[in-house]
Amino acid sequence: MHKSTSSSSLGPDGLDLTKKFFTHINGGAPIAPTKRSTKITVVGVGNVGMAIAQTILTQDLADELTLFDVKEEQLRGEMLDLQHAAAFLPRTKISASADYAATAGSDLCIVTAGARQMPGESRLNLLQRNVAIFRQVVPPLAEVSPDCIILVVSNPVDVLTYVAWRLSGFPPNRVIGSGTNLDSSRFRFLIADHLDVNAQDVQAYIVGEHGDSSVALWSSINVGGVPILSFLERQQIAYEKETLKNIHNQVVQSAYEVIRLKGYTSWAIGYSVASLARSILRDQRRIQPVSVLAKGFYGIDGGEVFLSLPAQLGRSGVLGLANVHLTDEEALQLKKSADAILLVQSQLDI
């Protein structure tokens, strides 16, 4: 296990320097047993994993951050690079290891590990390789942190969240996929850009698959509390469904565009996942669209499938799903999205 170079308090003669550096209060009591720290583990130190780790640190979301990967040299390098920023960050214990024991006692395990698609490789073959990685990663994480929440970021996130749920043996409220949380942020940005308002004043959800079959919930969009489509109809302002479809297509294509331009996505997913971590660990009970076990909701009854729905998040994971009104067309699209994911799942050996 890699540790901070400053973790030892022993001087050259074996003297504990903390006893010389500080004068302790007489009769002081030890830390109360109810006092506990928050520990986050990030599995995978690629571009996405490190963007998440960096955002978690700058937003002061954990007392302890553990990085896990099998690439030991890169792992140690990333750990040292973060540790060297200690003077500019909130105090967080940063460690790194290729041993699962180092992740023990985590409150939240964020899984970003996954294989990259090879030239000419089918998406199904890539998925099978990622399932093999999850077989190695998820069971030991669950074993050493049996009370943690698993947050899957690796793609295809909906199917891999289902895989993580099956492999962990955890209840479904404690296995979550990052899902369309970032898609919804892109959606809000595009709507805000069209209306020249702050994206934080836009409430809008993309649900379903984090992918091509995602569903834009146009009927429930509001800006500053004003339902947009109802407002346009009341004001007799004409709008074309083609315009709405184009905005949704921009959302779907956004990641592909970023990857084409810079080779990968990182910063936005870092902020998105940090937002989910805050909602969960600080029990904020925010409603965010994440990948959850959707069977039995909104007419989805074809099988156990994970896809994104607006969920209330808190310290025990998914606390409940918001009863967002869907039009008949949106409900049909959501069911088609579920069927598309189930079709892929049926081809897995899990």
Image (tube, grey):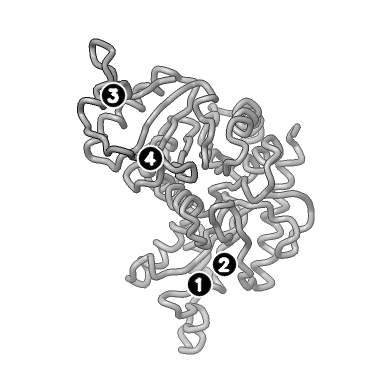
Q: Which disc is residue 217 wearing?
A: 2
The nearer-to-camera label among 3 and 1 is: 3
Q: Amino acid at mark 3?
A: Ser
Q: Which disc is residue 221 wearing?
A: 1
Q: CA distance from mark 1 to mark 4?
A: 54 Å
Q: CA distance from mark 2 to mark 3?
A: 51 Å
Nearer the observer, 165 or 100: 100
Q: Amino acid at mark 1?
A: Ile
Which residue does the numbered mark 4 point to in the structure image? 29
Q: Amino acid at mark 2?
A: Leu
Q: Earlier in the sequence, mark 2 or mark 4?
A: 4
Q: Secondary structure at mark 1?
A: loop
Please state if 108 lies on the left or on the right of 188 as rendered.
right
Q: Amino acid at mark 4?
A: Ala
Looking at the image, residue 311 lies above or below residue 61: below
Contact, CB < 8 Å: mark 2 with mark 1?
yes
